[in-house]
Amino acid sequence: MLSREQTQGPSSTRSAIANLYETHFERVARYISVRIGNFSEAQDLASEVFIRALRSADSYKDVGAPLEAWLFKIARNLSIDHLRQKARRPVQVPVEALFSLAADTDDPIDSLHHQEEVKRLHDAVQHLSEAQRQVIALRFGGEMSADEIALVMGKKPGAVREMQSAAIRKLRQLLGEET
């Protein structure tokens, strides 16, 4: 995370955003991909996140939250806008790429079983509440901690941990696993 000293003033904010691009682009793209269901479009939108951040650097106000939280708020809003424009729900999220579940096998039968499990997981995620999907997307797609997610969502870290726990319990129930 960047310290407050690194984010004081517009020019240092721009510099910090440029550094975040180098270190966080893939995280932002994975997070958006979980939200919109298309990794290629997510990469384009992730680029737009950083462009918007640079354009807004002069108006950035340090409120004690890390710059990363502000960046993920931009990503969250852009994802919501994108889904509204498309007027559709997320479909066929490439979960294997997002949650690091990709099967390292050349065996077509193992690959088929893996694809079936990924589809089951995707279908189960659709039964979560919007807030739970958001927490899961930020946690696993954005690789964020509960504290970081809390800053993005405007919630307390304990509430985020409870939402994540409830979401995982529900996913286990839907997937027929013991909790």
Image (cartoon, rainbow, N blue to C red):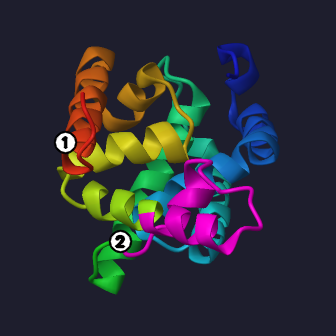
Please, what secondary structure does the residue beneath circle 2 have? loop
Q: Position of residue 114 (x, y in %)?
A: 54, 62
**Residue at the location (59% across, 34% down)?**
68
The residue under label 2 is which amino acid type? Answer: Pro
**Residue at the location (24% across, 27% down)?**
179
What residue is pinned by disc 2?
A: 90
170 over 93 or under it: above or below: above
Q: Nearer the viewer, residue 134 or 1?
A: 134
Would residue 94 be visible to someone looking at this image?
no
Would residue 173 be visible to someone looking at this image?
yes
Q: Position of residue 125 (x, y in %)?
A: 29, 55
Label 1 or label 2, whichever lies nearer to me, is: 1
**Residue at the location (64% across, 47% down)?**
27
Q: Residue furthest bottom?
A: 86
Q: Position of residue 128 (x, y in %)?
A: 20, 51
Mark closer to the chain start, 1 or 2: 2
What residue is pinned by disc 1?
A: 173
Q: Position of residue 121 (x, y in %)?
A: 37, 57
Q: Is residue 71 left or right of residue 170?
A: right
Is residue 112 located in the magenta-colored stretch of the structure?
Answer: yes
The quadrant in which residue 83 appears is bottom left
Q: CA distance from mark 1 to mark 2?
A: 22 Å
Is residue 2 located in the magenta-colored stretch of the structure?
Answer: no
Q: Nearer the viewer, residue 135 or 23?
A: 135
The residue under label 1 is which amino acid type? Answer: Gln
Please, what secondary structure does the residue beneath circle 1 have? helix
**Residue at the location (57% across, 36% down)?**
143
Query: The magenta stretch spans which residues?
Result: 91-116
Q: Nearer the viewer, residue 139 or 18?
A: 139
